[in-house]
Amino acid sequence: MQKNTKKRFYFQPLPIGVVKLDGKIGRLTGNMIFHRINSPEARNVVYRETIDAFRNKIDDANGVTGIWQGEYWGKWMISAVRAAEYTGDAELKSFLRSAAYELISLRDENGCISTYRNPDWFNAAAPEEVKKVLGVVSDWNWNIWCRKYTLWGLLEAYRLLGEKPILDAASDLAANLIDTLEKKNTDLRKTGTFCGLASCSILKPMLQLYRYSGDERFGNFARDIVDSWRNDDGIAPGLISNAFSGKPLHLWHPECGFWTKAYEMMSCVDGILLYSTLFDDQSVVDAAENLYELILKYEYNRCGNVGFNDQFQHSALYLDSISEPCDAIHWMRMCFELFKLTGKVRYMETFEHTFLNAFLAGITRDGKWGMRAVRSSGHHMTAPEQAKMNYNHCCVNNLPRGLFNAAESCFMTGENCAAVNMYIPFSADGVLPDGNQVQLTLSGDVLTGDKAVISVSASRELTLKLRVPQWSTENRFTVNGKDITADSEYATVVLPAGNSRIEVEFKLAVYLETFPADGEVAGLPQWHLRRYMEGTNSEGLPLHDSPKALLHAGALLMARSKLIGDSAENMFHSPSMANGKFSCSLKKSDDPDTLAQFTAEFTAPDGSVRVEKVCDYASAGNIDSTDTELFTMFF
């Protein structure tokens, strides 16, 4: 029997596909769906590589460590299911049915579906054995992490198709893992790598399985994971107990070294928030809110994301930033779920900032591929070959999910109302929970300071909340020709049945933010330096040893780039604007290849004027490039 959600939501997304992204971001979404999911290459090459990993079983081939080819099928399936819902593509839905049953055909007699030759092996060999074989010490074993994505992919297929054999296969896969852990008397926190964060992130799909199947065994397994994080027993990660400590994440367990893997930890938080809804547990929501505050304070980086190359290591301290798209996706997920559960608008503000800046910077402008990491200047790290795969990558396979999550965020429902949360072009056509048939279109380039027009058609009276963004210094809302007032978070209007027209005008907050806020730039420590320089063609990337400024224009971070005609000499060798209180005014320029472009006029305290061409940070370096002076977000 399926389990129902017990906890009340303040806001809920509409079914995927009701809201579609329009404009430049909409075109990017369409391109990514085609190239990564629907094109002949996507079906015959990209997908085929993911399923063949279960036949080849090379993840543990070296006998001492394990890699992660087993994650890609699940990641691809999760994005593809949502693409099928988003587009309503019946042919894609049929392909996904075949893909699910192809995977199921590869399970063993115990119901296990794995890319490991020894599916019961959950930890790397002893360090001396690993070094003897590989020449270096490594504790990699991604077996349960891979199992998580396989389980999740099957459950997404079941959600789309509703076919019991798929749910049965998912149940058998999960039961096999639980049986093996119980037989080996193994603590999940002590499996895999990064203090069990990767393994424990199976919490979310295990909860989804519990919800769909009603099998208490899966619910109890999930509860055990959450309870282990409440324990103050000194065993890392103590995700819930430490959330109330007030300490920076990297200081929770210093004896564990560099264990604070951002992607895996936030994946665990995603599971915690689902747990709160199924078991009506407010204490874990409180823990997640505390984690948000700690991450925002200590880990928010210059790119508008969290972490330093996928690690929580006091990232907010450092000027030069490098940030992983998977972290952006899961930070957005964390904010999205907290917004649903609490109704606090600050979570949507943070979601929007990360989406429009660090996340979009991680997608190549043609929608065919993406970045392994985005940098604050120089060039981004294009996603390379990974885990001996040529056509799949952890970040690239995750990227469509972030786009669909953004579409869900634009227009949501609340108690007796609907809400517009983001002012990027989108359209919605669907039935609200109260039966109101609504069509809504938002057009206009708000991100560059233009007016937005929201056209609404409703079958009955509609209470609509319009978010008041904190990045605007002046707001004007006009409904059917009449100005309305707004509170600090939303303007609330009651629209009659039939057609309505809303005009929205925001004045962009344009300002320079100086980093570091106090003291001098200390430079990157050795570990951070090594992580910053990861990837190919990184030699010669600029590093900064004096204060710099970031330019904000509303929701967007601005940058300079050769892609809009700037020069390396100007970008990297002109005087810094962090040394005085400059004011800035912007004049919009049209450019089909950027989300926003302006001519910026900076006025110094002495009255001197400096003119620069600038564009949004996400568009400044979103190509595969080896140019170490391609762009910079620093002024």
Image (cartoon, rainbow, N blue to C red):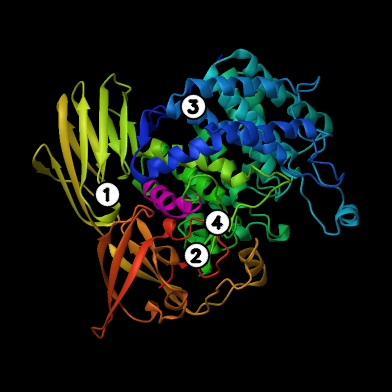
CA gap between label 3 and label 4 equals 28 Å
CA gap between label 4 and label 1 equals 27 Å
Amino acid at pointer 1: Asp
Amino acid at pointer 4: Asp
CA gap between label 4 and label 2 equals 15 Å
Amino acid at pointer 3: Ala
Residue assigned mark 1? 445
Residue assigned mark 3? 84
In primary-sequence order, the first of circles 3 and 4 is: 3
CA gap between label 1 and label 3 equals 28 Å
Q: Nearer the viewer, residue 26 or 434?
A: 26
Amino acid at pointer 2: Ser
In primary-sequence order, the first of circles 1 and 3 is: 3
In the image, residue 334 above or below residue 619: above
Q: Nearer the viewer, mark 4 or mark 2?
A: 4
Q: Position of residue 376 (x, y in %)?
A: 50, 65
The magenta segment: 348-363
Asked whether disc 1 touches disc 2, contact meaning CB atoms under 8 Å apart, the reply is: no
Residue assigned mark 2? 376
Residue 218 horizontal side relative to residue 406, left or right = right
Which label is found at residue 624?
Answer: 4
In primary-sequence order, the first of circles 1 and 2 is: 2
Asked whether disc 4 touches disc 1, contact meaning CB atoms under 8 Å apart, the reply is: no
Label 2's element?
A: loop
In the image, residue 267 above or below residue 174: below
